[in-house]
Image (tube, rainbow, N blue to C red):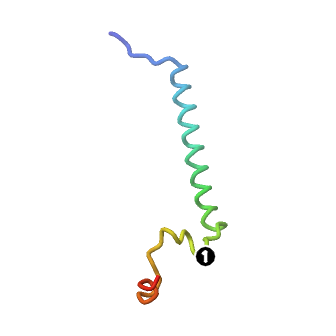
Amino acid sequence: ANDWKVAINTLLIFLVAFQVFVVGMLADLIGRANRATHEVQPAAGFTRDAPGRVPPKRREAS
């Protein structure tokens, strides 16, 4: 009859870790939801990464 017991400190540590995880997930969710409505997208973005939009005639001349 070997009873398996967990100390209350261990349960407390796991509870606190879970609470920190939940608060982090909620903060991430709120941040993502607010970013979508308040962030202004740039007009051109990163033009160096975009595919070329120069017409073929001008591209050959340059």
Instruction: Report the residue at 46% width, 87% height from top.
Output: 58
Quadrant hosting residue 9: top right
Instruction: Report the residue at 62% width, 62% height from top.
Output: 35
Q: Position of residue 57 (x, y in %)?
A: 42, 90
Tag count in the figure? 1
Say what secondary structure mark 1 lies in: loop
Q: What residue is shown with label 1?
A: 43
Q: Nearer the viewer, residue 49 or 17?
A: 49
Q: Nearer the viewer, residue 60 or 23?
A: 60
Q: Nearer the viewer, residue 18 or 5?
A: 18
- Farthest right residue in view: 38
Q: Position of residue 54 (x, y in %)?
A: 47, 83
- Farthest top residue in view: 1
Instruction: Report the residue at 53% width, 72% height from top.
Output: 47
Q: Amino acid at mark 1?
A: Ala
Q: Is residue 52 above or below residue 15?
A: below
Q: Is residue 31 above or below residue 45?
A: above
- Farthest left residue in view: 1
Image quarter where the N terminus lies is: top left
Label 1 neighbour load within 10 Å: few <14, some 14-19, many 20+: few
Q: Is residue 38 above or below residue 6?
A: below
Q: Is residue 24 above or below residue 57?
A: above
- Farthest bottom residue in view: 57
Q: Position of residue 36 (x, y in %)?
A: 60, 66
